[in-house]
Amino acid sequence: MSMFSSYACDIDRHQGTKALGNQLHQKLKGISEDKEEREEKEVEKEEEEEEVKELKQLSDQLLDGAALNSADKYATLFKDCYFFLAREVPRESLEFVIRSFGGNVSWPGSLTGEPESSPRITHHIMDRPSQKHIFLGREYIQPQWVYDSANYCTLLLTHEVTY
């Protein structure tokens, strides 16, 4: 072999090696990029899972808060109300509902409640339209108003059920 052919072989080998090196470099680069993509996807997946956990916790907190607010609302529905029960109404069930929802109640002959003439009384519950004396600043309602207000968890309008 001549020196030129030896040199040409070296060049060919060098170019072949260089080509193989480039191919190897491209493959390694591809593997590296694939690895980076996989790592990015894993990080994204972990972040997504973390966000889902946080959203679930917030949702649970909102539901717990709503339950507490609902319980508070029930416990304080009648808190600013003082009821006087006329003789003809079902005293025991009305007393139970009113006190359960945070209200105060009195009736004729009650030892611990307010007398019928007390200005603290806000609602007078009666079943008959005959009333000897009408007290100003007081709502006259039927027993059903108490039960309906409790069921709807809101103080209903009284003008529709008054006498």
Image (cartoon, grey):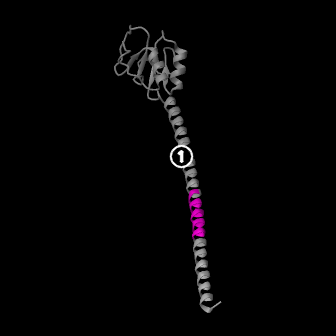
Residue under the point 58% across and 84% down: 11
Front-most of 5 and 54?
5
- Looking at the picture, does residue 152 appear above or below residue 161? below
Residue under the point 53% across and 38% down: 63
Q: How many marks are shown on the rendered structure?
A: 1
Instruction: Find disc 1 in the rendering and name its residue.
Output: 55
Identified by mark 1, the residue type is Leu
Q: Is residue 82 magenta?
A: no
Seen as rendered, the residue at the extreme front is 1
Q: Position of residue 145 (x, y in %)?
A: 44, 18
Q: Main secondary structure of the magenta part?
A: helix
Magenta residues span 26-41
Q: Position of residue 70 (x, y in %)?
A: 51, 32
Q: Quadrant of the C terminus?
A: top left
Seen as rendered, the residue at the extreme bottom is 3
Front-most of 83 and 98?
98
In the picture, measured across the screen, residue 127 lies left or right of residue 48, that is left
Residue under the point 55% across and 56% down: 44
| SS of the residue under disc 1 | helix
In the picture, measured across the screen, residue 85 lies left or right of residue 3, that is left
Front-most of 83 and 148?
148
Q: Is residue 30 magenta?
A: yes
Q: Position of residue 160 (x, y in %)?
A: 36, 16
Front-most of 153 and 122?
153
Q: Quadrant of the N terminus?
A: bottom right
Q: Position of residue 27 (x, y in %)?
A: 60, 68
Residue under the point 42% across and 8% down: 128
Q: Residues within 10 Å of mark 1 (few under 14, many from 20)?
A: few
